[in-house]
Image: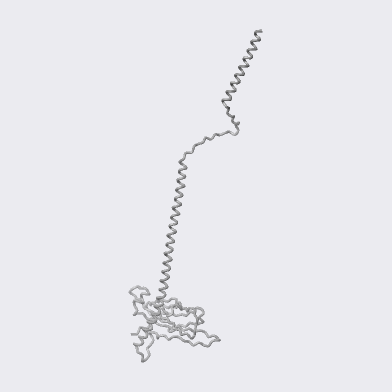
């Protein structure tokens, strides 16, 4: 059973042209138009995802809305004798009205409503004056789903060929998606390892900070206890004698034993002198 016509109008319809030389990135543009009265999801796939950058590669088109898609081919060495097998596929589906669903889950949940259109890539490189004209070669692509069947063609064989082409295209896309998922898983694992290392370092820093706080608190307690002990020791008050600078210097204290001896000697001398004077006066009185 043949699929219905493509929901979106695609310009160009059959092929994407990339003009060389291909020493730098080359861009080609595709325009998608929604001619219906429904919201339509779209998604763009390619058989060589590492060689192209598609912006945007998926989205939603409202009724009668258009969207320009930029397809950038990465630089590579062009060989005119090498066959080009790069293809693009535009998938589309009417947005369900009864539920809200993720765009990635939508393609898996309603595969029977999915419609697609394929485009081939054509490389055109300008001729060099010293080289012969290259022969333009490109791989043939299956006819779009809405193309008319030629007379005498078996519909069953066309459906089988279309299913085989879709299976081959999806297998290549799934393989690329698996590779990208594996690389993302490696990056996530690496980030988790770095996160665990950072957490351990953070815990070590916290422990060091706690130890420093404990040391500072211990020193503060020791200093406070020493200050308290110093305040509890009584300080003997030493009387301070005020001395007038204009007063005479204090006399030296006399030695009491020497003074007493001098007094006794003076008294003895005075007694001897008195005796002598008395004798003299007595002798004169007798005369």
Relative depth, front residue between 182 and 280:
280
* Image location (x, y in percent) of residue 225: 45, 45
Relative depth, front residue between 245 and 109:
245
Residue found at x 41% / y 73% = 182
* Image location (x, y in percent) of residue 132: 53, 88
Relative depth, front residue between 27 and 51:
51
Relative depth, front residue between 258 and 209:
258
Q: Is residue 95 above or below residue 158?
A: above
* Image location (x, y in percent) of residue 166: 38, 82
Q: Quadrant of residue 270?
A: top right
Q: Is residue 242 above or below residue 226?
A: above
The residue furthest top is: 287
The residue furthest bottom is: 152
Residue found at x 33% / y 73% = 99
Residue 261 relative to residue 106: left or right = right
In the rendered image, the quadrant that contains the N terminus is bottom left
Q: Quadrant of residue 232?
A: top left
* Image location (x, y in percent) of residue 118: 41, 83
Q: Quadrant of residue 286?
A: top right
Marks counted in the figure total 0
């Amino acid at each position: 059973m043949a699929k219905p016509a493509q929901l979106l109008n695609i310009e160009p319809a059959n092929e994407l042209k990339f003009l060389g030389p291909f020493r730098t990135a080359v861009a080609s543009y595709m325009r998608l138009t929604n001619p219906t009265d429904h919201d339509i999801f779209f998604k763009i796939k390619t058989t060589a995802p590492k060689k192209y950058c598609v912006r945007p590669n998926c989205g939603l088109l409202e009724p009668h809305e258009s969207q320009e898609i930029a397809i950038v081919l990465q630089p590579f060495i062009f060989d005119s004798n090498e066959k080009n097998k790069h293809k693009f596929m535009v998938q589309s589906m009417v947005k369900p009205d009864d539920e809200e669903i993720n765009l990635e889950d939508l393609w898996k949940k309603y595969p029977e409503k999915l419609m697609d259109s394929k485009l081939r890539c054509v490389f055109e490189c300008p001729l060099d004056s010293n080289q012969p004209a290259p022969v333009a070669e490109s791989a043939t692509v299956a006819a779009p789903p809405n193309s008319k069947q030629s007379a005498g063609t078996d519909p069953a064989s066309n459906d089988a060929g279309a299913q085989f082409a879709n299976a081959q295209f999806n297998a290549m896309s799934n393989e690329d998606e698996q590779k990208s998922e594996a690389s993302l898983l490696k990056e996530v694992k690496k980030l988790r390892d770095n996160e665990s290392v950072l957490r351990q370092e953070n815990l070590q820093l916290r422990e060091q900070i706690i130890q420093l706080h404990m040391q500072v608190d211990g020193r503060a307690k020791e200093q406070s206890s020493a200050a308290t002990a110093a305040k509890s020791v009584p300080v003997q008050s030493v009387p301070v004698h005020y001395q007038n600078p204009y007063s005479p210097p204090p006399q030296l204290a006399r030695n009491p034993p020497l003074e007493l001896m001098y007094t006794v000697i003076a008294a003895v001398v005075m007694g001897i002198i008195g005796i002598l004077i008395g004798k003299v006066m007595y002798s004169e009185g007798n005369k």
